[in-house]
Amino acid sequence: MATREELLAQGFEEVCGLDEVGKVLPSRVKVGERSVLLCRDGERVRAVDEICPHKSRSMAYGVIFDGKIICPHHQYAFDLETGRCDHRSAPVHVYEVVIEDERVWVRP
């Protein structure tokens, strides 16, 4: 278990409570200047950029299914662990996430 001070020293930002992370739809948070989506992947929480690299559209209303976030605009699927796309698109950026004392921390 890391302390708040240790997480801050490692570059993590506290973004929300664990209970605020959606189970089917992602939750949008700010990490630094970036808009990031928090997604439940089973018992884990993953964080990816909000903007789909395929057509630069928001994935905030994308569905989380089978370890992936599905872009609501083009149905491209991005792996929540690796960021890889099922189609020919560039990957989405994946952020490191730590859960500590029911709080979600993300490293930009």
Image (spheres, rainbow, N blue to C red):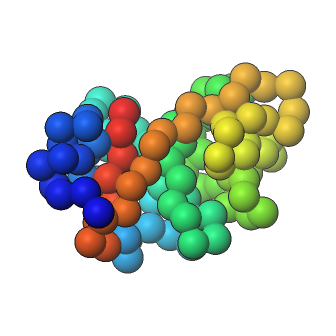
| Residue at 46% across, 43% down | 96
Give coordinates of residue 100: x percent, y percent.
Answer: 30, 65
- Left or right: where 69 falls relative to 93: right
| Residue at 50% across, 48% down | 47
Q: Nearer the viewer, residue 44 or 32?
A: 44
The reply to whether residue 101 is in sight is yes
Identify whether 102 is placed above or below 1.
below
Give coordinates of residue 11: x percent, y percent.
Answer: 26, 35
| Residue at 18% across, 57% down | 3
| Residue at 72% across, 45% down | 79
- Left or right: where 30 falls relative to 40: left
Q: Residue furthest bottom?
A: 19
Give coordinates of residue 45: x percent, y percent.
Answer: 51, 61
Give coordinates of residue 63: x percent, y percent.
Answer: 68, 60
- Left or right: where 88 falls relative to 1: right
Quadrant location of the N terminus in the rendered image: bottom left
